[in-house]
Amino acid sequence: MTTTIDHITKQLDRLYNAQAPETGIIKNFIKAETEANTQLRSYANNVKQKHLDNYVYFRGLTEFSNKCSKNCYYCGIRAGNKNVDRYDVTDEDILDAVRFAHEQNYGSVVLQAGERSDKHFVERVDKLLRKIKQITNDEIGITISLGEQNYETFKRWFESGAHRYLLRIESSNKILYYKIHPKNEKHSYEHRIQALYDLKDIGYQTGTGVMIGLPFQTRKDLVEDLLFMRRFDIDMVGMGPYIEHQDTPLYKYRNQLLPQQDRFEMTLNMISLLRIIMPDINIASATALQALDPMGREKALKAGANVIMPNVTPGMYRNSYKLYENKPCTDEEAADCVSCLEMRIGLTGNQVGYGKWGDSRHYHNRRGR
Ligand code: SAM
Ligand code: SF4
């Protein structure tokens, strides 16, 4: 047993110290067994403590509209799904949710929605950003996750106060990308990559991520995803398990998927591996983890994640932002979610970074290089 443990530790040391991480080692750890999982996650947690600290940062998440102009094959709120009640949270309700997050001393908010690029939407977001800065005396950090936009829009929103942007590549493998998206101008792989470059160029803390356990996805794809993130030198990541939704085209492949438990474990391993090869980035503990395990987000925090996104969207809208089945917390008001979170985070050996923006240390390090 000691030999096995020593061997695993040596492999992890090699990954941590490598200029170019070895794909074979990463691949073995993505779907490791119990003993290796335990060691991998605890190693990643130590890397996090060494390069960052034991703070976990809150982002109050507002999913402010499920209206979307795109048709990603995996997503429950895709434009083609006619079984969705479409909503827009009013500006006043969004600002109330922000006020709530501010009063709770969350430090940051995330505004997320379906993708739209029409003039009305672009201006609305712009005004909201300015208003958020104003009502919080510039005390709250703002991440946005509003899909692909042109350079001008990204820049405009940056100048209005957003400073972090999350745009998942979903899969870095172009062939797989087109198996999970229609192949047309609205869903172009090249455009998505370009959007990531634009965000970085403008000065955003730039985040991306992938879904884990997609149909057709191999472990080699996941290795390449991690290497893509390292090559791109991302500042933050949000990656989570793929969860099927019955009103989507990918649902027909549900029998080919890995069991949900495997997708869950592989996601934790992906988080740990990324922490080891990119020690100072921000890693979010995705909500989809909680859909598969009630303690999923806390487990991710023990495996190297350092950001958590409590949902502050007003309760009446939550049932309609169903990206996948069993999305958690849809029947709770924001205050109910907060009450036990601090205690749960304490149990992971971390503490909440109340009142701090919790920016990506990697962003500041890379800009100081
Ligand atoms: N519309 C924006 C975009 O696509 O970037 C932001 C909102 S979108 C709902 C946020 C993320 O939800 C996507 O990047 C995708 O990875 C994730 N998502 C969508 N459907 C999912 C599913 N069935 N299982 C897991 N994650 C899903
Ligand atoms: Fe729209 Fe985003 Fe869902 Fe794609 S993932 S359909 S862009 S909300």
Image (cartoon, helix red, strand yellow):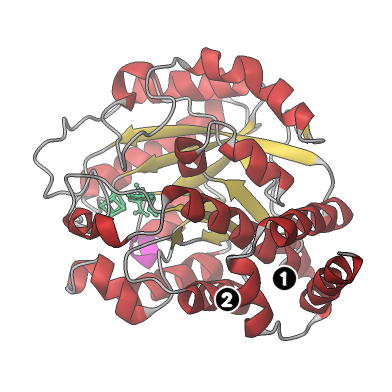
**Amino acid, disc 2:** Phe
**Amino acid, disc 1:** Ile
Helix, strand or loop for the magenta stretch, by majority: loop
The quarter in which the N terminus is drawn is: bottom right
Mark 2 element type: helix
How far is disc 1 from disc 2 in space, using C-alphas? 13 Å
- In the image as oriented, which residue stretches furthest toward the left? 82
Residue 277's label in the rendered image is 1
Q: How many numbered discs?
A: 2
Residue 232's label in the rendered image is 2
Question: As displayed, is residue 98 above or below residue 291?
Answer: above
Mark 1 element type: helix
Question: As displayed, is residue 147 above or below residue 8?
Answer: above
Question: Could you tell me residue 219's position as x and y percent?
Answer: 49, 73
Q: Viewer-proximal residue, 306 or 301?
A: 301
Residue neighbourhood size for the residue with mark 2, other residues' Cα within 10 Å, grouped as few (<14), some (14–19), many (≥20) = some
Question: As displayed, is residue 168 above or below residue 159?
Answer: below
Question: Could you tell me residue 64's position as x and y percent?
Answer: 35, 33
Q: Quadrant of residue 227?
A: bottom right
In the rendered structure, does residue 150 fall within the stretch colored magenta? yes
Q: Would residue 325 be visible to someone looking at this image?
A: yes
In the image, what residue occupies the spot 22% across and 58% down?
250
Per the rendered image, the range of residues in magenta is: 148-152
Question: As displayed, is residue 47 above or below residue 223?
Answer: above
In the rendered structure, does residue 178 fall within the stretch colored magenta? no
Question: Could you tell me residue 98's position as x and y percent?
Answer: 51, 25
In the image, what residue occupies the spot 33% across and 71% down?
216
Q: Quadrant of residue 34?
A: bottom right
Q: Viewer-proximal residue, 119 or 51?
A: 51
In the image, what residue occupies the spot 51% across and 43% down?
289
